[in-house]
Amino acid sequence: MTTKYLTFILFLNTLYAKDIYYYQNNHKVYLKQIEKLNRDSKHIRYETKSNIILIVKNQIIVKFISTNNIEKYIKEYDLILVKQLDKNLYLFKINDKNNLFDITNQLGNKNDIKYAQPDFIKERYLR
């Protein structure tokens, strides 16, 4: 009985598992989380299908075509402006790091935003 129950739960888990991805040059890049997320962690580690390790903080970089709606997006997505990096290029902090990729992808689909991406930290390896 417990084996059937466990199998059923695993099946449901795969049905409702959320794909984690971001867009790079208009192509989806799928990620696999390789470290458990906990309340105190400041960074989350992911791995791409090509085995590249990416570390993500709770920050995103957004390039606006027009900054007319910047305040609207700050309120809608509960963003905190960290700093302006360049003309129409901003670094934001996201309060809910569980939704980092969802928020990034939603912003990237807006007409007045050129791109939105997580603020990645790439691991360096010694050769």
Image (cartoon, grey):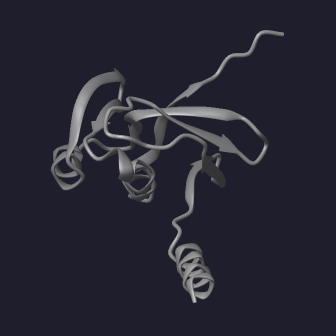
Q: Position of residue 95 (x, y in %)?
A: 25, 42
Q: Residue at x 53, y 69 (%)?
A: 17
Name the side, left or right, on which 41 lies relative to 94.
right
Q: Position of residue 58 (x, y in %)?
A: 37, 36
Judge by depth and name the residue closer to the eye, 51 or 88.
51
Name the side, left or right, on which 96 lies relative to 2.
left
Q: Residue at x 46, y 55 (%)?
A: 105
In the picture, the quarter occupied by the C terminus is: top right
Q: Residue at x 63, y 50 (%)?
A: 32
In the picture, the quarter occupied by the N terminus is: bottom right
Judge by depth and name the residue closer to the eye, 108 or 58.
58
Quarter of the image for residue 79 reads top left
Q: Position of residue 19 (x, y in %)?
A: 56, 63
* Residue positioned most to the top: 126
Q: Position of residue 36 (x, y in %)?
A: 49, 43
Judge by depth and name the residue closer to the eye, 126 or 103.
126
